[in-house]
Amino acid sequence: MHRLYHHHSHFPLLDKPINRKNQTKMRFHTPTFFFFGCCIFTFVATAVHGAGYLPLQRNVPLNHRVEIDTLRARDRVRHGRILRASVGGVVDFRVQGSSDPSTLGYGLYTTKVKMGTPPREFTVQIDTGSDILWINCNTCSNCPKSSGLGIELNFFDTVGSSTAALVPCSDPMCASAIQGAAAQCSPQVNQCSYTFQYEDGSGTSGVYVSDAMYFDMILGQSTPANVASSATIVFGCSTYQSGDLTKTDKAVDGILGFGPGELSVVSQLSSRGITPKVFSHCLKGDGNGGGILVLGEILEPSIVYSPLVPSQPHYNLNLQSIAVNGQVLSINPAVFATSDKRGTIIDSGTTLSYLVQEAYDPLVNAVDTAVSQFATSFISKGSQCYLVLTSIDDSFPTVSFNFEGGASMDLKPSQYLLNRGFQDGAKMWCIGFQKVQEGVTILGDLVLKDKIVVYDLARQQIGWTNYDCSMSVNVSVTTSKDEYINARARQTGSCSRIGIPSKLLPVSIVALSMHIIIFMKSLHL
């Protein structure tokens, strides 16, 4: 893992001060409502303040094959960017993308966010390993002007937005960012700024801006359609970039950090009661990919939880052991313990997954032994690979990661093997785990795909379960009532069935459903 350094270096600042105009905090009150449309008896219940939606798009062609070493390089750069440093409704992001490296491109997940007044759209990378939302400023001297990902790049115009305002040094958000080494202050211009320098030589500098962020909201029974709503947030406006961030091959408009820090969009919205202090994703790992990302808690009875390691800047868990076909491997648990140089991080922004050598070698040896009669093993470009004539589900073992609290993450062969085409008439499969000599164990999309993963910051825990991410999910918001929304049904406009346990349904909804059933029966009398 590359280290991130925060420097107090000079960079271009904005030329003009901006007056704060028309900035309001919006709160949305939504009672539970009953949705009756093309599907009969489909219950869709929102939380107190409504539900919002933003689309996610992949930023590379699905048919673009990339070698594993390229993915390793991309992850190394990404890891260098991991920053050290009463509830409302649900915001729902439609996910597109795939974790399959043969079709993944650079493995970036993006969404379009609308910022400013009038609102403008920006394509930003989704990143759970950093906290800050930053977007390229129109005053940026060397930001990419075009992208090899087939997207049109836009730049945020602080003067052109009537609701934009520079964040002054006296702002509490600036003080919080300075304390977390995520900001500096320029007393001469009373302007809160940032500089992130990465070990790979790339970096970004800019200023913090306060402005409106827009998302579609569902406001309840009186307004069943999506309604455009907004909330004022603080984000970075990049005025200078260096290194790989200046390249055009995978350029985007910025990065949307979903980390646990106070400056993340999740933290800002939840602190004002606009969204809950929990988010969830379900990344589809086959076909055309896709999935769901919501600011809310996905409900599924089989989800198991493990407590987060306290006082960490990332999503650290206590990994205790690894098992192959139920047999625990001989690995010293100390190699997974959280310290300045070690630990285990859940990071959906990482394409592959990384194990320290003390864990990688025993795991590969155990898999080799289990498949010795079914596959031919060899090394290809630094990865352990196999030539297989049969189904991998029939010949390869289940790998289990066992965490504190008794929570196990069970991986099917398709969740730790990568298909690398054919060789000598046989399919070539490679172990997707990458070996690192020392440092942090990182569990990325390789193992997180085809799972519901819940990041519960309020309860300080992460949960997961295997799931078909093309299906609907039920999302709960922690309020005084039991209230739910079906994310897939709303985001696609389809009438998907919802399997909410009856004990979770409010009594009023159960009663209402009985009246409707009686009414429908009367139509046939």
Image (cartoon, rainbow, N blue to C red):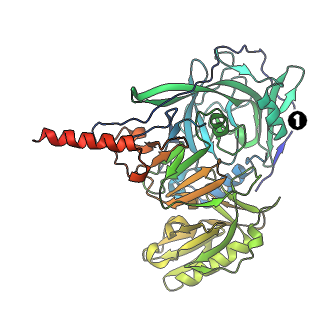
Vertically, is 140 above or below 99?
above
Q: Name the amino acid type tagged 1.
A: His
Answer yes or no: is residue 118 visible. Answer: yes
Quadrant in which residue 168 is drawn = top right
Question: Residue 326's spot in the image, x, y percent?
Answer: 56, 79
Task: Determine the residue located farthest toward the left in the rendered image.
Answer: 525
Name which residue lies at 68% across and 30% down.
136
Q: Looking at the rendering, in which quadrant would you find the N terminus? A: bottom right
Position of 90 with respect to 434 (left or right) is left
Residue 438 versus residue 169: which sits nearer the camera?
169
Local secondary structure at mark 1: loop
Name which residue lies at 50% across and 86% down.
373
Query: What is the total number of numbered labels drawn onto the structure image?
Result: 1
Question: Residue 134's spot in the image, x, y percent?
Answer: 69, 34
Quadrant in which residue 400 is drawn = bottom right
Name which residue lies at 61% across and 69% down.
406
Task: Determine the residue located farthest toward the bottom in the rendered image.
Answer: 373
Q: Looking at the rendering, in which quadrant would you find the C terminus? A: top left
Q: Residues within 10 Å of mark 1 (few under 14, many from 20)?
A: some
Residue on which the image places disc 1: 8
Position of 180 with respect to 320 (left or right) is right
Name which residue lies at 80% across and 51% down.
3
Question: Residue 72's spot in the image, x, y percent?
Answer: 66, 58
Vertically, is 124 above or below 230?
below
Answer yes or no: is residue 60 visible. Answer: no
Residue 275 versus residue 147: which sits nearer the camera?
275
Residue 414 versus residue 226: which sits nearer the camera?
226
Question: Residue 523's spot in the image, x, y percent?
Answer: 14, 38
